[in-house]
Image (cartoon, rainbow, N blue to C red):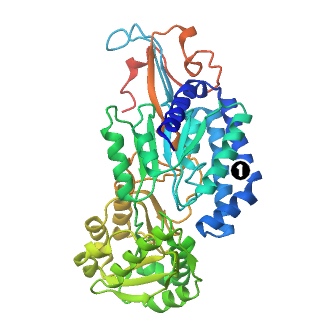
């Protein structure tokens, strides 16, 4: 990608940004639905390419493509609904308790061109047409996607399908554009025409890109999803009630897609002496090997697995296999080890980092009442935290765990497993550092759209000068929260 190409791409995005932002909700929604339908129509070709480039299964990729299309359609509904605009209207009030109040009207507007760095492990759901792209398009922002080197042909195919569909539905040409190459991504992130960035990937790369975004002459928001170990806590009563179900779910969650998921449970806390070893070993042995995404992922997983297996005090429950061919491409089966809590604390440098692949650590604890304190000591921010308790179990230990998870992660699960993130309005997919660079946002669910908007208020503006969502006749039909004159006299009466 030449400098001239990059300049033209950025210029095009900046040129059409006002037009796409001004597109009425139903027209913007129509374009998003057209993109979703086009992706599903191209499913056989897209999934075939994705299988070749990533090694992921047809079933997994077909489900992921459907998820991507559903998310676009959900966002289309959200655009038409208009709640995300957060329209607030304060009527002029000459009798306002603090003096005369002007007419003030506030809503959220698109930030402008967005640069999205695609992920390797979700070639549809977090790549060219994935969540960040869909959210930015829904917000009214043109999107430039930096393709991931792990699936280059798929990236071009997907971009062609989506861009064509958007434009056929009336979106300006260039609403979605694609670039490739690490340096091209860095150069585009530094371009002053880019107004926000998004990323899903490693802590190292995500931090580098976040620092670049912050160090620009005009800093921009950067939404990175980086690393998470997603601890799971199992009580003795839960094991007594449902040991087989917990073991089945654990191995399935660890081994699914070869453990190459940001929500994979990296640590399972279980009571000491619970005799999980045999159940884990037998279940892990039945899992067929799965290809890792690319040689770079293979190399990183091999190093991490070696470090865990060689750490002092580690007991191997399921050693697993890592087979590497002459090209450096790997195939793996699950590796599960166990350590006592005190060993994890003592050797945290070797054991606590995320293992991106089918590896997890069972942590044996003696006192459930200490679990919350242990977690507070060991873990930074995470995307998720899970508690497996028995039916009706309500103890101080469980309540303390739930409280810790709510302060340290974006999603608190009761039972179940964190892999598999539902595309729903209420979903939160984010968390404190290092799970993300911004713990007040989400990359899944309708709240993701607001990341690519900013608030602006109009004071004493004549009706004809107001944007449609702020006008009294409300031509877009969006929700408006209005504070009428005279209301301030009664403030505090609810107490």
Query: In the picture, which quadrant includes the C terminus?
Result: top left
Secondary structure of the residue carrying tag 1 is helix
Disc 1 crowd, CA 10 A, few/some/many (<14, 14-19, 20+): many
The residue depicted at 50 percent of the width and 45 percent of the height is: 116
Q: Is residue 378 left or right of residue 70?
A: left
Name which quarter of the figure residue 139 lies in: top right
- Residue found 66% across the figure and 41% down from its top: 163
Q: Quadrant of residue 398?
A: bottom left
Can you say whether 31 is above or below 356 in the image?
A: above
Query: Looking at the image, is 273 positioned above or below residue 439?
Result: below
Q: What residue sits right under mark 1 in the picture? A: 39
Residue 67 appears in the figure: yes
Given residues 373 and 197, the one toward you in this image is 197
x, y percent for residue 27: 69, 30
Of residues 75 and 331, the one nearer the viewer is 331
Using the image as rendered, state which of residue 245 and residue 143 is in the foreground: 143
Q: Position of residue 368 (x, y in %)?
A: 33, 76
Residue 215, percent across and down?
30, 39
Q: Classify residue 37 as left or right of residue 303.
A: right
Relative to residue 102, is residue 420 depicted above or below? below
Instruction: Judge whether 39 appears above or below 243 on screen.
Output: above
Residue 452 located left or right of residue 219? right
Q: Position of residue 270 (x, y in %)?
A: 39, 80
Residue that extends furthest to the right in the rendered view of this protein: 41
Q: Which residue is depicted at the point 64% across and 46% down?
A: 159
Horizontal side of residue 47 vs 344, given as left or right: right
> Is residue 441 something one can see in this rendering?
no
The number of numbered discs placed on residues in the rendered structure image is 1
């Amino acid at each position: 990608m030449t400098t001239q190409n990059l300049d033209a791409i950025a210029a095009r995005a900046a040129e059409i940004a006002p037009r796409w932002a001004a597109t009425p909700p139903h027209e913007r929604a129509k374009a998003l639905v057209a993109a979703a339908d086009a992706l599903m129509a191209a499913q056989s070709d897209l999934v075939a390419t994705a299988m070749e480039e990533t090694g992921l299964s047809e079933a997994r990729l077909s489900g992921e493509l459907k998820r991507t299309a559903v998310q676009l359609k959900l966002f289309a509904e959200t655009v038409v609904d208009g709640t995300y605009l957060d329209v607030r209207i304060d009527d002029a009030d000459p009798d306002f308790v603090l003096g005369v109040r002007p007419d003030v009207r506030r809503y959220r507007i698109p930030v402008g061109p967005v640069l999205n760095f695609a992920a390797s492990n979700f070639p549809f759901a977090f790549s060219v047409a994935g969540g960040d792209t869909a959210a930015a398009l829904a917000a009214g922002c043109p999107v430039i996607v930096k393709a991931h080197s792990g699936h280059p042909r798929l990236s071009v195919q997907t971009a062609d399908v989506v861009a064509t569909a958007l434009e056929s539905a009336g979106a300006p040409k260039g609403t979605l554009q694609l670039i490739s190459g690490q340096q091209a991504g860095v150069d585009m992130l530094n371009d002053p025409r880019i107004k926000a960035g998004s990323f899903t990937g490693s802590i190292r790369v995500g931090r580098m890109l976040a620092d670049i975004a912050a160090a620009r002459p005009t800093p921009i928001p950067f939404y990175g999803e980086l690393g998470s170990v997603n601890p799971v806590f199992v009580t003795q009563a839960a094991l007594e009630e449902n040991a087989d179900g917990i073991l089945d779910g654990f191995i399935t969650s660890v081994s699914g897609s070869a453990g190459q998921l940001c929500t994979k449970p990296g640590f399972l806390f279980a009571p000491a002496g619970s005799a999980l070893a045999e159940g884990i070993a037998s279940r892990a042995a039945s899992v067929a090997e799965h290809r890792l995404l690319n040689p770079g992922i293979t190399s990183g997983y091999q190093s991490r697995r070696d470090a865990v297996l060689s750490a002092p005090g580690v007991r191997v429950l399921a050693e697993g296999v890592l087979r590497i061919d002459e090209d450096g491409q790997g195939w793996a089966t699950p590796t599960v080890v166990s350590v006592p809590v005190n060993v994890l604390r003592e050797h945290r440098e070797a054991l606590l980092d995320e293992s991106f692949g089918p590896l997890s650590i069972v942590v044996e604890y003696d006192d459930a009442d200490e679990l919350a304190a242990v977690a507070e000591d060991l873990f930074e921010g995470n995307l998720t935290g899970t508690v497996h308790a028995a039916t009706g179990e309500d103890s101080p230990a469980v309540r303390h765990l739930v409280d810790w998870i709510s302060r340290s992660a974006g999603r608190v699960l009761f039972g179940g497993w964190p892999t598999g993130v539902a595309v729903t309005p209420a979903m939160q997919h984010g968390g404190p550092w290092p799970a993300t660079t911004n713990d007040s946002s989400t990359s899944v669910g309708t709240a993701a759209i607001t990341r690519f908007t900013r608030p602006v208020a109009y004071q004493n503006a004549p009706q004809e000068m107001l944007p449609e969502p702020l006008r009294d006749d409300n031509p877009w039909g969006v929700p408006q929260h209005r504070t009428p004159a005279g209301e301030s006299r009664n403030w505090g009466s609810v107490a």
